[in-house]
Image (tube, rainbow, N blue to C red):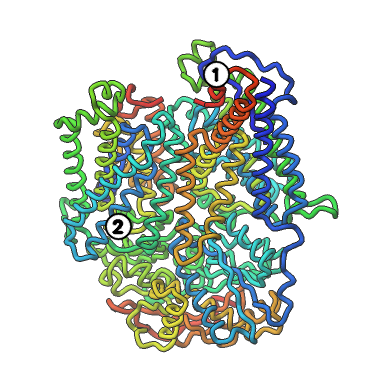
C-alpha cells in the first residue's frame, strides 16, 4: 500500500510539469487557435536563460524572474513577428508553423548553449520530508507550490482583471471585440506572453529533475497534449487536473500493469484519455462550444 | 506529377462540369512534360542522385496520402509516419521471413495499411481536430517504442534488411539504381493518377462538403463518418505503400527511421508543398529530403549542423507564412498573374473579372 | 477560356522544366564519379565520417571533433607515407536514410576507402558497404555489430557491451552473491545485450527499468526498486538520465551499491549533472580515459590530445570523454594506415585486424589495442571506483579473453 501511494505521489509530482505546460498550450490555443508544438522548446529556452543568469552570478530566484519575463517578451515577439501572419482558421498551417518554431528554437538553443546535458540547481534546496511512510523531496514540494502559485496568478489575471476580461473577449470573439475598439493583435500577443511565462515556470520546475538539455521537454510536451485533451483545452482548471491525472496514471500504469514497464507506461494514460474524448470530445472540464471543429 | 485542376468549390456552389476531354486541360500536358523529364533523368545523373530522387518519390507517396487526408478530407494527422513505417515493416518482413516476392510483399503492405487505417480510422473519424491530433501523435510516438519492445519479431535495433536490391535491373543496359528509380517513379505516377481521379469523382465533391462544414454535408445527404472512414483507409493504404517503397529503396527498416519527428515532417511537407495539390506533395517531399543535407553541405564550420537546421526551419516557416496554400498554391497563383499580365498586354479582350478566385483555395 | 488555358499551360510547363533543370544542376552527371582517383601515389587517402551532429543524438557530436583532431594532427606530421588523409564528414542527424545517403556519397563520389560512424544506426549501412566492399568502422558497442560473419566489412571500436556486463555479473557473484539487482537502461538492444551478459554470469536483475532516451524523471521507478528490496543498481543509460537518477537517489538518502557502465561513467555524461557526491563509491569497469578527470591533469598523452584539439579549433569540446574517444578512433585508423600494404579497403581492414599491443591515446594505462576478434579490438578493463573527485583503480586490469568471456 505504501508503495502504491508513494508511486502515485511520485506520479502526481511529475504531473505538475505537465499541468503547467498544458496550461500554456491552452492559453495559446484559445487565443490564436494554434496547437503550439513549440511550447516545450520555449520552456527550454526559459530554463537555459535562468541557468545562464545563475552562471553569471545572479541568485537563483531573480534568475528565474528574469527567465519568466524574458519568455513573456519572446512570446510577444513570436506572435507579432511570426504567428499573426497565418490566418487563425488554418489549423494545419498553424500546427506546421509550430513545428518550424520547434525546429528553429531547438537549433538556436543548441548553437548558443550546446547539446551537452547540464545539471540545474534546485531553487528549493535538497531536503526531504517523510510523512506516514511517504517521502517528498524539496524539489517536488517546491515545484508544486510554484506551479500552484502560477495557476493562481493566471486565474486572478483572467477572471479578476479588466486585462484578463479583454483578453478573453478577444480570444472568444475577435470580431465583436474589434467593434468595441479592442485591437486584437495586441491582446493576442499579450496572451502569448502570458502563455510563455507559464511555460517558463514549467521549464524551471522541470530542469532540476530532468537535467538541462535541448530535448528536455519533448516527453513533457507529449504528456501536456494528452493532459489538454483529457481536461479540455478550453478549461484552465481542466488542463491542470488533466496534467496531474496523466502523471499519476503513467506512474501507476508502468508499475502495476503487467508488460507496460518504463517505456510503454504512457499507453495506459493515453488509452484512458482517448476513451474519455470519444465519449466527451471537449474533455472532462470542457464545454462543447469551445472545441474547434 | 500533374498540377490538377481544382475540382470543387467548398461551398458547393454549382460549378459547370468540366466537359473538356482530359488531354486538353493544361494540367494534363504539364504532367506529360514532367513525366517525360522524370523518365529522362536516370540517363543523365549518377546512381547516388537516383537513390536520393527515389527517396523523394517514396516520401512523396506518403505526403500525397496525407494530402488526401489533410487537404481533401480536412483531417490533420500527425501519425502518418507510423503508418508509413508499418507498411515498410510489413513488406520487409514478408520478404525476409515469408520469402514472398517483392510485388506480393507490396500487396501485403497495402493489406496491412488498410487494416491499420480501419482500426485507427474507427475512432479517428469521430474526433475533431485537436483530439485527432492527439490520437495520431500518440500512435506516432509509440510506434518506435513498440518496434523495440517486440524485437524478436521486428529485429529491434538491427531491423530487417534486404540482402539484394528489391528491384534488380532485368537488363544489362540499366543499373539497379536506374531501374529502381524508374519503378518507383511509375508507382508514384500511378498513385497520383489514382488520387486525382478519386477526388475528381462524386466522393471527392462530397468530401469538399465535409470540409466546408459537417452540417452542410449531412443536409446534402452525405454519410459523413462512412466517407471519412473510407478516405482514412485509402490514405493509410497509400501511406503503407509509400513506406514499403521507401524501405525497398533504403534496403532496410529500423526503428530510428520512424521517430515522431518523421511523422511531423510528413505533415510539414504536406503543408509546405501544398496540401491541395499533388505536385505539391512532390515538392514538399523534395524539400524535406534535400533541404537538410543541402543546408548542412553549404554551411561550413563548427556549429554547422544546427545552423543548417535553423535554415531548414526558417525556410519552412517562410513557406507557411508566405504561401498559405503551399508552394504549389503559390506557384499556381503566380502562373495566374503572369497569365493575366500577358492577357492584358495583348488587350484582345475587354477587362475581365479577376480569374484568381478559382485558384484561391479556401 | 481557351486563351487563358493555353497560356497557363505554357507557364506551368515552363515552370516544370525550370524546376527540372534546377534539380539536375544540383546532381552529378552519370559516369563522372571519381573512384579511380585514388590510384595516384600522392593523392589523398579518403575516409568518410557520417556522424550525428544534430537530431536526437546531437550530443555525441564531440566524438567527430576528436576524430577530426586526430586526422589533422596526423596530416600535420606529414600524413601517412607522404600521403594526406582526407576526412570527409557529413551530418546524419541519427536518421538511417541520411546515413545511407552519406555513405553512398562517400563511396560513389568521394572515393572513400573506409566509412566511420558513431554506432546504433550504423547497422543501416552494413549491407551497402558489404556490397561495395568498403570498410566500415563504428565507435559504439552494440552487440549486433559483432556479426562479422554476415557483414565481413564492418568493425567496431568499443568493446561489445555484453562483455562488460559479464564482468559486472562476475564481480557480483564473487563479492555479493545475495545482491538484489536493479537495472536501469535504454529500451533498446543495448539493454538486451547487457541483460544477456549478466545472465551469462548467473545474475538476473530483480527489477529492470528500460526507458526511452530522454526520460529523466525516474522517481517512480526508484520507489519501485526500493520497495522490491534492491540493494545494487546497475546504470547503463546516457545523459541526462543517469546523473539525474543518481542525484535523486542521493537526495532521498538511498545508497545502494552502484555500477555505472564505462561509456556512461564520465564527467560529461553523469558526474557534471549529478555533482560528484552522489557518484561517490560507484564502481565501473573502465577502458578509456576521461579528459575531465583530475587524475589526468599531468598526463602527457592527454596534454598532447588537448593541444591537437586546440590546433584543430575544437578546444570547446576537449573536456568531453567522447571527443577523446573519437580522437582514439582516429589514432587507431592512422596507426592501421601506417602499417597497411595497400591504401584501399582491403589493406586497411587487414591492418585494422592486426593490432598487436598497440598503444592508443584514449586507453587507460596498461590497456592496448589487440588483434581483432568479433570485429572488436579492445578486451581489457580496469575496475575503478569513484572517490568523490576522481575514478581510482581497484585491483588489476582484467582481460575478457583470459577470463573466457571471449573465446
The chain ID associated with circle 2 is A
Of residues C395 and B165, the one drawn nearer to the viewer in this rendering: B165
- In this view, B226 is above or below C231: above
- Residue C406, located in which quarter of the rendered image? bottom right
Q: Which mark is residue A48?
A: 2
Q: What element carries label 1?
A: loop
Q: Residue B266 carries which label?
A: none
The answer to whether residue A93 is left or right of residue A162 is right
Q: What percent of the width, then of the height, locates residue B324?
A: 48, 34
Mark 1 lies on residue: B353
- Residue A195, located in which quarter of the rendered image? top left
The answer, for residue B293, to whether it is visible in the render is yes
Q: Distance between the residues labelled 2 and 1?
A: 55 Å
Q: Residue furthest right?
A: B172
Mark 1 Cα-neighbour bin, 10 Å: few <14, some 14–19, many ≥20: few
Q: Are marks 2 and 1 in contact (CB under 8 Å)?
A: no
Mark 2 Cα-neighbour bin, 10 Å: few <14, some 14–19, many ≥20: many
- In this view, C213 is above or below B90: below
Of residues A223 and B296, the one drawn nearer to the viewer in this rendering: B296
Q: What percent of the width, then of the height, locates residue B76?
A: 48, 33
Please report the residue visible at 25 percent of the width from the left and 53 percent of the height from the top. Answer: A204
Q: In which quarter of the image is the C terminus of chain A?
A: top left
In the image, which is nearer the foreground, mark 2 or mark 1? 1
Q: What percent of the width, then of the height, locates residue C38?
A: 71, 75
The answer, for residue B247, to whether it is visible in the render is no
Q: What element carries label 2?
A: helix
Of residues A239 and C178, the one drawn nearer to the viewer in this rendering: A239
Please report the residue visible at 70 percent of the width from the left and 37 percent of the height from the top. Answer: B189
Q: Do labels 2 and 1 share a chain?
A: no
Please report the residue visible at 71 percent of the width from the left and 42 percent of the height from the top. Answer: B185
Amino acid at each position: 500500500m505504501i508503495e502504491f501511494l508513494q508511486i502515485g505521489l511520485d506520479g502526481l509530482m511529475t504531473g505538475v510539469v505537465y499541468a503547467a505546460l498544458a496550461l500554456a498550450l491552452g492559453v495559446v490555443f484559445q487565443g490564436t487557435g494554434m496547437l503550439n508544438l513549440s511550447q516545450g522548446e520555449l520552456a527550454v529556452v526559459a530554463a537555459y536563460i535562468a541557468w545562464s543568469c545563475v552562471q553569471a552570478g545572479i541568485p537563483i530566484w531573480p534568475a528565474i524572474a528574469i527567465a519568466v519575463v524574458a519568455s513573456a517578451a519572446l512570446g510577444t515577439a513570436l506572435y507579432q513577428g511570426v504567428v499573426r501572419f497565418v490566418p487563425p482558421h488554418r489549423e494545419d498551417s498553424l500546427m506546421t508553423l509550430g513545428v518550424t518554431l520547434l525546429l528553429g528554437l531547438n537549433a538556436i538553443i543548441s548553437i548558443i548553449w550546446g547539446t551537452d546535458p547540464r545539471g540545474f540547481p534546485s531553487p528549493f534546496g535538497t531536503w526531504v520530508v517523510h510523512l506516514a511512510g511517504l517521502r517528498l523531496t524539496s524539489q517536488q514540494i517546491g515545484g508544486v507550490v510554484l506551479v500552484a502559485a502560477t495557476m493562481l496568478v493566471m486565474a486572478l489575471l483572467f477572471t479578476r482583471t479588466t486585462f484578463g476580461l479583454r483578453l478573453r473577449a478577444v480570444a472568444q470573439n475577435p470580431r465583436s471585440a474589434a467593434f468595441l475598439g479592442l485591437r486584437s493583435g495586441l491582446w493576442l500577443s499579450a496572451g502569448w506572453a502570458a502563455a510563455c511565462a507559464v511555460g517558463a515556470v514549467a521549464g524551471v520546475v522541470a530542469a532540476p529533475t530532468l537535467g538541462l538539455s535541448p530535448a528536455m521537454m519533448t516527453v513533457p510536451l507529449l504528456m501536456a497534449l494528452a493532459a489538454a485533451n483529457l481536461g479540455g483545452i478550453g478549461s484552465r482548471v481542466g488542463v491542470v487536473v488533466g496534467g496531474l491525472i496523466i502523471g499519476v496514471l503513467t506512474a501507476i500504469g508502468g508499475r502495476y500493469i503487467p508488460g507496460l514497464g518504463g517505456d510503454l507506461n504512457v499507453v495506459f494514460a493515453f488509452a484512458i484519455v482517448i476513451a474519455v474524448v470519444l465519449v466527451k470530445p471537449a474533455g472532462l472540464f470542457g464545454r462543447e462550444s469551445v472545441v474547434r471543429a | 506529377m500533374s498540377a490538377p485542376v481544382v475540382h470543387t468549390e467548398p461551398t458547393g456552389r454549382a460549378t459547370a462540369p468540366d466537359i473538356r476531354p482530359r488531354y486538353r486541360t493544361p494540367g494534363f500536358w504539364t504532367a506529360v512534360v514532367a513525366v517525360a523529364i522524370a523518365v529522362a533523368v536516370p540517363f543523365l545523373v549518377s546512381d547516388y542522385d537516383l537513390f536520393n530522387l527515389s527517396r523523394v518519390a517514396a516520401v512523396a507517396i506518403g505526403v500525397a496520402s496525407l494530402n488526401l487526408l489533410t487537404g481533401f478530407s480536412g483531417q490533420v494527422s500527425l501519425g502518418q509516419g507510423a503508418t508509413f513505417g508499418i507498411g515498410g515493416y510489413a513488406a520487409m518482413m514478408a520478404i525476409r521471413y515469408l520469402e514472398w516476392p517483392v510485388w506480393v510483399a507490396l500487396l501485403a503492405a497495402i493489406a496491412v495499411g488498410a487494416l491499420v487505417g480501419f482500426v485507427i480510422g474507427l475512432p479517428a473519424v469521430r474526433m475533431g481536430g485537436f483530439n485527432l491530433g492527439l490520437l495520431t501523435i500518440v500512435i506516432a510516438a509509440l510506434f518506435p517504442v513498440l518496434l523495440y519492445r517486440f524485437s524478436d519479431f521486428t529485429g529491434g535495433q538491427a531491423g530487417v534488411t534486404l540482402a539484394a536490391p528489391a528491384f534488380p535491373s532485368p537488363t544489362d543496359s540499366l543499373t539497379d539504381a536506374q531501374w529502381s528509380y524508374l519503378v518507383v517513379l511509375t508507382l508514384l505516377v500511378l498513385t497520383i493518377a489514382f488520387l486525382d481521379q478519386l477526388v475528381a469523382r462524386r466522393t471527392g465533391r462530397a468530401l469538399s462538403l465535409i470540409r466546408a462544414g459537417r452540417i452542410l454535408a449531412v443536409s446534402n445527404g452525405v454519410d459523413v463518418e462512412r466517407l471519412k472512414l473510407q478516405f482514412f483507409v485509402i490514405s493509410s493504404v497509400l501511406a503503407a505503400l509509400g513506406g514499403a517503397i521507401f524501405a525497398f529503396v533504403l534496403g532496410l527498416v529500423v526503428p530510428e527511421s520512424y521517430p515522431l519527428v518523421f511523422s511531423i515532417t510528413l505533415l510539414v511537407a504536406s503543408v509546405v508543398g501544398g496540401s491541395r495539390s499533388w505536385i505539391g506533395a512532390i515538392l514538399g517531399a523534395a524539400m524535406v529530403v534535400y533541404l537538410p543535407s543541402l543546408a548542412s553541405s553549404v554551411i561550413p564550420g563548427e556549429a554547422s549542423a544546427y545552423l543548417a537546421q535553423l535554415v531548414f526551419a526558417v525556410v519552412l516557416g517562410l513557406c507557411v507564412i508566405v504561401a498559405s496554400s503551399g508552394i504549389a498554391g503559390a506557384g499556381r497563383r503566380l502562373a495566374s498573374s503572369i497569365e493575366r499580365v500577358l492577357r492584358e498586354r495583348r488587350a484582345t479582350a475587354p477587362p475581365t473579372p479577376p480569374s484568381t478566385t478559382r485558384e484561391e483555395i479556401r | 477560356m481557351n486563351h487563358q488555358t493555353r497560356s497557363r499551360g505554357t507557364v506551368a510547363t515552363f515552370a516544370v522544366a525550370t524546376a527540372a533543370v534546377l534539380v539536375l544542376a544540383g546532381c552529378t552527371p552519370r559516369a563522372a564519379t571519381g573512384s579511380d582517383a585514388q590510384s595516384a601515389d600522392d593523392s589523398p587517402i579518403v575516409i568518410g565520417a557520417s556522424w550525428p551532429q544534430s537530431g536526437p543524438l546531437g550530443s555525441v557530436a564531440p566524438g567527430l571533433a576528436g576524430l577530426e583532431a586526430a586526422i589533422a594532427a596526423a596530416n600535420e606530421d606529414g600524413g601517412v607515407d607522404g600521403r594526406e588523409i582526407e576526412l570527409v564528414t557529413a551530418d546524419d542527424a541519427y536518421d538511417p536514410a541520411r546515413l545511407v545517403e552519406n555513405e553512398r556519397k562517400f563511396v560513389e563520389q568521394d572515393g572513400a576507402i573506409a566509412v566511420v560512424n558513431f554506432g546504433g544506426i550504423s547497422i543501416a549501412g552494413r549491407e551497402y558497404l558489404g556490397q561495395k566492399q568498403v570498410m566500415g568502422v563504428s565507435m559504439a558497442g552494440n552487440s549486433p555489430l559483432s556479426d562479422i560473419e554476415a557483414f565481413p566489412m564492418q568493425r567496431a571500436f568499443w568493446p561489445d557491451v555484453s562483455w562488460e556486463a559479464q564482468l559486472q555479473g562476475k564481480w557480483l557473484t564473487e563479492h555479493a552473491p545475495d545482491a538484489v539487482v536493479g537495472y536501469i537502461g535504454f529500451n533498446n538492444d543495448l539493454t538486451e545485450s547487457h541483460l544477456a551478459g549478466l545472465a551469462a554470469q548467473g545474475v538476473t536483475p530483480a527489477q529492470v527499468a528500460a526507458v526511452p532516451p530522454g526520460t529523466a524523471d525516474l522517481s517512480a521507478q526508484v520507489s519501485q526498486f526500493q520497495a522490491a528490496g534492491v540493494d545494487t543498481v546497475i546504470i547503463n543509460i546516457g545523459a541526462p538520465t543517469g546523473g539525474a537518477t543518481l542525484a535523486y537517489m542521493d537526495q532521498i538518502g538511498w545508497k545502494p551499491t552502484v555500477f555505472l557502465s564505462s561509456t556512461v561513467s564520465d564527467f560529461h555524461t553523469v558526474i557534471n549533472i549529478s555533482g560528484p557526491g552522489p557518484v561517490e563509491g560507484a564502481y565501473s569497469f573502465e577502458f578509456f580515459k576521461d579528459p575531465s578527470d583530475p587524475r589526468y591533469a599531468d598526463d602527457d598523452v592527454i596534454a598532447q590530445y588537448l593541444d591537437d584539439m586546440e590546433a584543430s579549433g575544437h578546444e570547446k569540446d576537449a573536456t568531453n570523454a567522447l571527443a577523446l574517444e573519437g580522437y582514439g578512433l582516429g589514432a587507431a585508423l592512422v596507426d592501421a594506415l601506417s602499417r597497411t600494404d595497400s591504401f584501399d579497403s582491403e589493406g586497411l581492414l587487414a591492418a585494422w585486424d592486426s593490432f598487436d599491443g598497440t598503444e592508443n591515446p584514449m586507453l587507460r594505462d596498461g590497456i592496448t589495442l589487440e588483434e581483432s576478434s568479433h570485429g572488436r579490438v579492445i578486451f581489457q578493463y580496469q575496475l575503478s571506483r569513484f572517490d568523490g573527485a576522481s575514478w581510482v583503480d581497484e585491483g588489476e586490469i582484467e582481460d575478457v579473453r583470459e577470463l573466457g568471456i571471449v573465446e
